[in-house]
Amino acid sequence: MRFFRKKVGFLIIGAQKSGTTAAFDYLKKNTFLNPSKEKEVHFFNSELDCKHDINYYHTFFDLKKTGILFEGSAGYLVNEFAHEKIFKYNSKIKMLALLRNPIDRAYSCWNMYRTYYTSNHEWFKNWMLKVAPVKYLQYKKRELKLINSFYDYVIEEINAINNGDLIEGSILVHGYYAQQLKKYYTCFSREQILLIESSEFKQNTKKCLNSIEDFLNIPRHNWDMETLSPIFTGSYKNGLDERSRKYLLNYYNPYNEELYLLLNKKFNWT
């Protein structure tokens, strides 16, 4: 068995639908970083035995190249055990978390999942069998008749949460940022996790990329030479309806206040 001295030194851990793909694709341009061959490796949020093997993990990287090894798997932030696995792998690692208004994040996620359900009703099952087949048995299936209504989709999930059930294709729990960060702070210092609000990243991309480079202590790339246009932005036929937004403003308010207290900082998410 081979053992590599070089370890992944930087992770983009989430949140899902918050700009992680754009961040990964931009940062690949900095030659002092060495990206994974594909963005979503899902090593630390998988329960499969093969993905517990470090040598398997390292096959996703070109270890002959120089630069800090990094990858971005948006599921790491929300996963209940990823922080412990990451700490065991590299306690000195640095991480980036992009945080998006949880209402807009949920709506974007629903649009993506609705597309998945339209093309394949079993998409969630197929996905879970690849990363967490045992845990999949705990999940309640969605009612397909509710898939095309964002409000009904949200209410179905809230009812499941209130009943103590897991439900497939969840969109709300990804926005419990304070709870997720608190888990990471039990293992890592706050200095190891850079937090950037996703609208700030979108509006001031160059400035945010510079802050990531400074965070990693690497030379800055000349971003003036690059076209920093939005990557994989969602285009929705209909916007978020007012009833759903008002409902979720009230729903997420305590979770957001918990986050603001944790960070001693507020975001304009009203």
Image (tube, grey):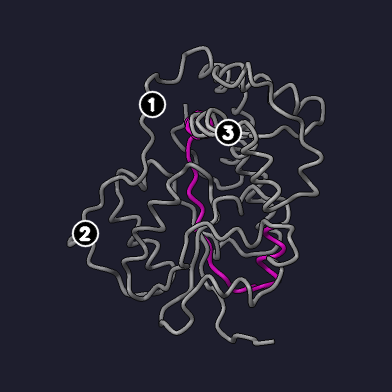
Residue 29 percent location from the top left of the image: 31, 66
| Circle 2 or circle 3, nearest the eye | 3
Name the N-terminal-most of marks 1 and 3.
3
The amino acid type, in three-letter code, at marker 3 is: Asn
| Circle 1 or circle 2, nearest the eye | 1
Badge 2 marks a residue whose secondary structure is loop
Say whether residue 206 is magenta. Answer: no
State the image quarter where residue 7 is shown.
bottom right
Instruction: Answer few, some or many: residues within 10 Å of disc 2's Cα (few below 14, many 20 plus, some between 14 and 19).
Output: few
Task: Measure the alpha-carbon separation of dots 2 and 3.
Answer: 37 Å
Residue 251 falls left or right of residue 97: right
Badge 3 marks a residue whose secondary structure is loop
The amino acid type, in three-letter code, at marker 2 is: Glu
State the image quarter where residue 224 is shown.
bottom left
Q: Which residue is rendered at x = 70% and y = 24% of the image? A: 158
The amino acid type, in three-letter code, at marker 1 is: Tyr
Label of residue 226 in the image: 2
Q: Are marks 1 and 3 in contact (CB under 8 Å)?
A: no
Task: Measure the alpha-carbon separation of dots 1 and 3.
Answer: 20 Å
The residue beneath circle 1 is 236
Depicted 103 relative to depicted 40: above or below: above
Front position in the image: 55 or 25: 55
Residue 223 falls left or right of residue 136: left
The residue beneath circle 3 is 120
Depicted 147 relative to depicted 226: above or below: above
Residue range in magenta is 82-110
Depicted 196 relative to depicted 193: above or below: above
